Amino acid sequence: MLDGLLYPESVAVIGASRSPEKVGSAILSNLIGGGYKGKIIPVNPTTDELFGLPCYKDVRDAGITVDHCVVVVPQRFVMDALAGAAAVGSTAATVITAGFKEVGAEGAAKEREMLEFCQEHGIRILGPNCLGLINTENSMNASFSAQMPIPGHISVLSQSGALCTAILDWAEGRGVGLAKLLSIGNKADISETDLLRALAQDKQTRVIAAYLESITDGPEFIQVAEEVSQQKPVVILKAGTTEAGGKAAASHTGSLAGADIAYGAAFTRAGVVRADNFEALFDYASAFAMQPLPKGNRVAVITNAGGPGIMAADAVETLGMRMESLTPEISEKVKGLLPAAASVANPIDVLGDAQSERYAMAVKEVLADPKVDSAIVILTPQAMSDCEDTAQAIIDAEHHDKPVLTCFMGGSQVMDARNMFVKAGVPDYPSPERAVAALKSMVDYAAWLDRPSRVVTRFPVNRHRVERIFARQKRSGRVEMGEVEAKEILKAYDFNVPAGALARTGEEAVAIAQRVGFPVVMKIVSPDLLHKSDFGGVKLNLNSAGEVMDAFDLMMLRIRRRAPEAYLRGVLVEKMGNPGREVILGMHRDPQFGPMLMFGLGGIFVEVMKDVAFYLAPLTHDEALEMLKNTRSYALLRGVRGQAGVDLNAIASALQRISQLVTDFPQIEEMDINPFMVGEVGTTPYVADARMILSGE
């Protein structure tokens, strides 16, 4: 896949130059200087020779098939260059040239023309408006970056050419090897999804690191990224959000669901490791490329200084991993190898005067402990420290099926030791927190790989009833669906809704209340008043016919004064439900990734704290439970300090039913069940209020 791009036997540089300030000169000299062994064909109509190679006025003049053409001519000549590429049988073209859709509508039209031509002639395009690409496996530097990385196992794709140069500089400075580096630019043709597929099959690549500003096709990305993540880690730094994803919305769910949350939900589904910044991108990628995955979340910290050990322990527990005590056997063995003042509690403090032998013994014994899944080794340089000898001792001792990450803290005194670690395949970090964060990314990814198979339950429901309700709503011309209709739909998907009916007069309200039984709740029904309580349109705990009649009259009077233009359909009279915990369930349809489900506690938790969790549909039972665990208020749901917990499985089931509903009916843009009342196990949860927003199509 993409062999013509990554493994060509011949490369033409259309727009090659001898002027050092020209991009065409840099690319040609990089191909030659990088050691590329294939045929290099410079193309420039003004000269017959460049850098000792014959130069052709047109690529056709070379008289051979050219697998890959690098196009670096002014924008007005790009189509001519691609016509030449098609004539010589090229299957790939890297278009360095800018001036396409990034400059506006005219450029976008030229980009479409270019793409249509190349699709017609079987040419895959990288770019345009890109830095180019590097493949260290065949020593091909078809970019205008001056740096050629050493071979390694991290492949990088980036939507920013400038960031590619920063990545190359970082790799050179740390001595980290790269497998492939690809600048994707405008993604006219080859997208991040295409490159994920190709790199998944690349034997040199152990981990894929990516900087992305957008994703071309959300559903396809999720499918491909999930497939690739099952083979090797994918670490992504995502920058930028879409205006559509961050728009204001009528529902709680819509207002809380931004594009960044959608990307986070997509990455979670696909097993993508998300990096929050540039440092984290390569902290994580280095760990994945150099060390085996941990089999659990139990961490041992070995240190020669108490403070950094405490910093590491704090970070471990903050990120949800465990500082496990050593087994008694290993603890006694380590104690016998260390001075009396040393500590064998975790962190294991080998003391400030520790030499290489003491570190080596501690690392060897700790890694042999069955209660330890991974280790972080910290050194702060003391007067008696031999940093290089200690680094070598750790390198010699760490050969194990458990990951070891190091943190040699400081500057010039530890730099040579840090470089030794990288060359030996041991990732080293400048601070304990960064080492722990990298380890956490490995723990999470390993847990994702070990997750149970996804089984999406399909519940028996009444789809025809929902179809009839939507047809009626469409005839009304309104996209806002109020409580009455929303609850009808939810009942069709087997949600429990309190008994009740719509009353248009006080007498009807009393009759309904007497039929369903007191106490009752009364709520105004109006397509113009989605937030009923803001207008005094909700009355609770009415216990008699007189209270119902008075509440009806007063409610209608006040609302007509406050919202004289509002159309009032009547009042919904329902049986008052049993008390319980208020939670909010919702859905917002993201323009990129589709329906995102939302869960949170009601009241202040959603209004002020915005303590909510999102997950993409379709949803499994395990994923629904994970949504609950991902809220800060999860402890309240389980029950704390003598308070009973609620039926977590009932909430999970409700989220699954919403997932099925919004998957079955893509016209639902947003919806809230707020509140959804849930009690202890054995009680029946119910929908207290609900509304939906439709697409209008």
Image (spheres, rainbow, N blue to C red):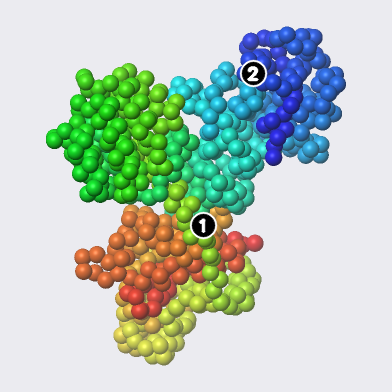
Circle nearer the N terminus (2, 1) = 2
Say which quarter of the image contains residue 278: top left
Amino acid under disc 1:
Leu
Assign a secondary structure to mark 2: loop
Q: Which residue is mark 1?
A: 616
Residue positioned most to the left: 340
Amino acid under disc 2:
Gly
Looking at the image, residue 407 lies above or below residue 511: above
Q: Return the x and y of residue 475 as percentages of the image width and height.
A: 64, 71
Seen at 47% across and 52% down, the residue is 448
Q: Nearer the viewer, residue 549 or 93?
A: 93
Q: Which mark's residue is nearer the viewer, 2 or 1?
A: 2
Q: Quadrant of the N terminus?
A: top right
Seen at 79% across and 38% down, the residue is 122
Say which quarter of the image contains residue 358: top left
* Mark 1 Cα-neighbour bin, 10 Å: few <14, some 14–19, many ≥20: many
Q: Is residue 645 left or right of residue 630?
A: left
Q: Which residue is mark 2?
A: 35
Residue 42: tell me if it is visible.
yes
* Mark 2 Cα-neighbour bin, 10 Å: few <14, some 14–19, many ≥20: some
Looking at the image, residue 66 lies above or below residue 564: above
Mark pair 2, 1: CA separation:
46 Å
Assign a secondary structure to mark 1: strand
Say which quarter of the image contains residue 40: top right
Q: Quadrant of the C terminus?
A: bottom right
Q: Nearer the viewer, residue 600 or 95?
A: 95
Q: Return the x and y of residue 633 as percentages of the image width and height.
A: 32, 59
Q: Return the x and y of residue 341 as percentages of the image width and height.
A: 13, 35
Q: Nearer the viewer, residue 673 or 28?
A: 28
Seen at 53% across and 38% down, the residue is 206
Seen at 60% across and 71% down, the residue is 470
